[in-house]
Amino acid sequence: MKSVKKLNDLVAKKIAAGEVIDRPYSVVRELLDNAIDADSKDISIYIENGGVTNIRIVDNGHGMTQNDLLLCYLPHATSKIETEDDLLTLTSLGFRGEALSSISTCTKLSVVSKQEGASAYKLTVHGGEFLSLEEYRGSKGTIINAADLFYSIPARRKFLKNAGSEATLCKNTFIEKALPFPEINFKFYKDDKLELFLPQSDLKTRVSNAFKGKFNSSLLGEVTCEEEGFKISAVLGRPELHRKDRKYIHIYTNKRRITEFAFVQALQYGYNEVLPGGNYPIAFIFIDVDPALIDFNIHPAKKEAKFKNLQTIHHRLVELIKSFLSQYKYNLTSSSKTTAPLVKELFDKKFPTIPLSTNSFKPTEKVAYKENFNQLLEMKPVYEKKIEEIINFKYLGQIMGVFLLVEKDNTLYVIDQHATHERILYNKLTELKVNSQDLLLPIEFEVTQEDEQLIKENIEVFTDLGIKISKIDSETYAITALPSFCKLLDSELIEFIKSQRGTKADIQRELYDTLACRSAIKEGDPIDTLAAHELIKGAFALDQARCPHGRPIWFELTKKELYELVGRL
């Protein structure tokens, strides 16, 4: 083995530079941080050949003095902090003094800067070596050119992608930095062509402009909330705006985009009742946290952070999302928004359990059910209208073994019978009191070490839900009691118990989802007119026209839309 030696300063600086700057977009990221920290109101960035040939950033911020320029490219030279205690009150994006040092080591760097009322100066540093500092011409602010990226570290350069790919990464970084600062004008130029202009605006408009054409921005909403120690601002997509990936889920804390699974999980919890399984919302979350409650000094690019109040923020974020979604109930008309709860209450009083599938009705039950319904019609609601008048529709029949066609108020509704019945049953389950019943024959099942750990974590939750589980030996457990309404196969129950993670609300929702799905009328099941009418009434009385898995239970076509489809103008 060779003997231990201390690296010379230049080699050490190149290694350190490679940790901070790995591609052109890293330069864009660091220079934008500095421009924003300088209180700039206008920032323009220019890239050539994907940022490899040159990256130039122009801002109108505070600028630097001659002495600042002499120090700014040195390792750990910063104006953001002086002592360790400053980390507790940190509000700037950059603070370590690594950016310009690293960039100057791996590029041919020039910096022109001027403060208000002072002379402009130009600094030139190539490959980490100082070349010159001279008086120059310029206006207030700073212009930085980082040319010939990795010319001094060829081992790095050979791993770069083609110019188009590198340019895309630079543009994405530009957008990422611009989103949380809607009060600043941003411009992005690619090979001397203006690619994106983000003028000063509000937060929602900034998001819309940044992703113009990527999704329907008219379906975005903006909400905020504030608690002790933090504030949340969010631009959220309505339920119909969703994707199969998390591309448009952005989480920012104190203006930095971070990777924090807890907040992504909060988004999923907030949206899970209105989005189809496997789909993700479009959501941009901006969280401002008291600097004393957060630490960014754990990741070179500040992509991760430690929070002292993570659970509190998580909980409040879920509430904010659910509050936003609650305004989109998909009620049919303005009048139904007031009558639907009344109709639901009357139905629940008369029919605590409504058999809706064809097989549930025996001939004698149909007669009794019809008599009860006739009695219900005689009850006078508040505007003194009969329920048949409040929910006035024409049932046209079942098609394809799954859809119910309904005409109402010059609109055609195509209703999914399974999704509708599933939502009605799910709602009823959530209103039932849990009564646990002991089983005559306990359901025994084998467990692995991992299964046992999961059961121990959730045992109290299962008990609260009426599912009692006891340990028989090191490899065997038994289900000894179930809630009276739990009608699942033994294999389904065992699989449910072995697979659950999350809060009590999450596990309860999954249980009720499963029960409602198993009990609901299925695709292909025929349905008689009486049952169809009651299912439709139940659908129109819902305040959330989506199944528990988030799928819409109907779609609608107005008379005007139908006329347009067949050319009747």
Image (cartoon, rainbow, N blue to C red):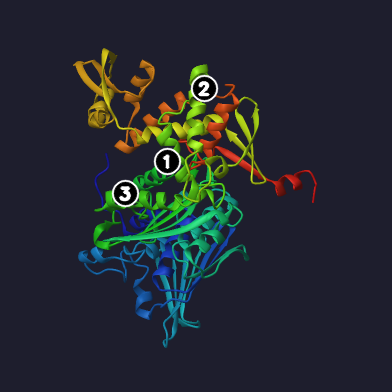
**Which is more foreground, mark 2 or mark 1?**
2
Q: Are circles 2 and 1 on residues that touch, CB within 8 Å?
A: no
Residue 123 relative to residue 78: left or right:
right
In what quadrant of the picture does the N terminus appear? Answer: top left
Nearer the N terminus, badge 2 or badge 1? 1
Question: How much space separates mark 1 and mark 3, taking CA atoms?
Answer: 31 Å
Q: Which residue is mark 3?
A: 315
Residue 366: mark = 2
Residue 437's x, y, as percent?
A: 26, 21
State the residue at coordinates (45%, 24%): 519
Q: Is residue 386 above or below residue 303?
A: above
Residue 284's x, y, as percent?
A: 45, 54
Question: How much space separates mark 3 and mark 2, taking CA atoms?
Answer: 47 Å
Q: Is there any visible trace of residue 551 in the rendered image? A: no
Q: Amino acid at mark 3?
A: His
Quarter of image, res 440:
top left
Neighbour tally class for label 2: few under 14, some 14-19, many 20 plus, Cα within 10 Å: some
Neighbour tally class for label 1: few under 14, some 14-19, many 20 plus, Cα within 10 Å: few
Label 1: element kind: helix
Most foreground residue, 160 or 437: 437
State the residue at coordinates (38%, 32%): 429
Q: Which residue is mark 1?
A: 345
Q: Amino acid at mark 1?
A: Glu
Residue 6: mark = none
Residue 465 relative to residue 270: left or right:
left
Question: How much space separates mark 2 and mark 1, taking CA atoms?
Answer: 22 Å
Nearer the N terminus, badge 1 or badge 3? 3
Q: Is residue 398 above or below residue 69?
A: above
